[in-house]
Amino acid sequence: MLHDFINWIREDLGRFTEDGLSWSHQLHQSLFMWNVIEGTHVLTIMFFAGTIWLIDLRMMGVAFRNVPISTLNNKVLPITMISFGVMIATGIIAFIGRDPMMYYHNIWFRLKMVFLLIALINILWFHYKVQKSEHEWDTIPPDAETPAKARSGPALWAFLGATLLLLGTFPITNVDLGLIVSARLALTVIALVSLFIYIDGRTPSIPRVVKLSGAISLSAWFLVIIFGRFIAYDWFYCEKTDPGSLAYVLQECAAYQDTSGEEGIFEEEVAPEDPPPEGEAAPTAPDAEPAQPTTGQEG
């Protein structure tokens, strides 16, 4: 059902003009509009993520320890809110104008939406639950000393060890893809949990639930941005994904293949060549050059 709705957005939404093109097709055909929208989207992501990470780092006690969180929040919140509104609006327009079906059947776009939902749920949790006790942790006491055990605790060594092992897996190429991906995910989880335990030990005056909310926010928005950039690469495009593979199933590539053959402006059309004049031989085509990779669009 959702697949059909996305296809309706691409083919029928806004088809009121004489040329019969939907808004998606009109925006796709525009000379500069889509690029302006995409550039604005990326720019506002920088403002939004940059300001919200300031708050996250302060909530975790990593930075701006001498600044009350209420003061920092009041300073950056207007920029955060405006950037968030523009980011969402331009993101929706970019989604409609590029190729909604391509986005919908892209594993990176789907992961981006999952972590975007997690980030939004965390915002609601923070504002309606965690922030109610802000007066208790608005300032960090000046005499709050870092426990000695946190300076060289096992959590720090676990973080360093897991990070080094994770980096060491990237040169490995002769191992099953599923195995190496699972190992990297496990090492990433161990590294992040160890880092959080280490930070938690260094900031005992800040409630753990506050630091947890900040850590979820920082991690979720980081992954939203990373997965959004990965959309530009064709690693798991349905056309290049083996049928029956996990990525093929998660992206619903079977449904995508059913609609990819339909004619539309998203497929480049080649005009037929005029036949040679009567009595002349058809020109011989030069040797074909190898196909060049095309750069996808980011989301």
Image: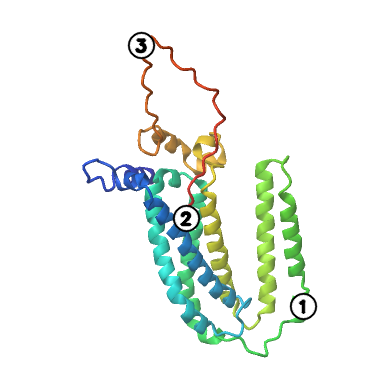
Judged from the image, the secondary structure of the residue bearing numbered disc 2 is: helix
Q: Are marks 2 and 3 in contact (CB under 8 Å)?
A: no
Quadrant of res 177: top right
From the image, tell me which residue sits under label 1.
Answer: 149
User: As drawn, is 84 to the left or to the right of 157?
Assistant: left
Quadrant of res 268: top left
Q: Residue at x 44, y 43 (%)?
A: 102
From the image, tell me which residue sits under label 3.
Answer: 278
* Picture mark count: 3
Cα gap from disc 1 to disc 3, whole angstroms: 91 Å
User: As drawn, is 75 to the left or to the right of 25?
Assistant: right
Label 3 environment density (alpha carbons within 10 Å; few <14, some 14–19, many ≥20): few
From the image, tell me which residue sits under label 2.
Answer: 113
> Which quadrant of the figure contains the N terminus?
top left
Cα gap from disc 2 to disc 3, whole angstroms: 59 Å
First reached walking from the N terminus: tag 2 or tag 3: 2
Above or below — where is 139 with respect to 215? below
Expressed as whole percent of the image width and height from the top left, the position of residue 187 reads: 69, 56
Given residues 11 and 269, the one toward you in this image is 269
Label 1 environment density (alpha carbons within 10 Å; few <14, some 14–19, many ≥20): few
Expressed as whole percent of the image width and height from the top left, the position of residue 146 reads: 71, 82
Q: Are marks 1 and 3 in contact (CB under 8 Å)?
A: no
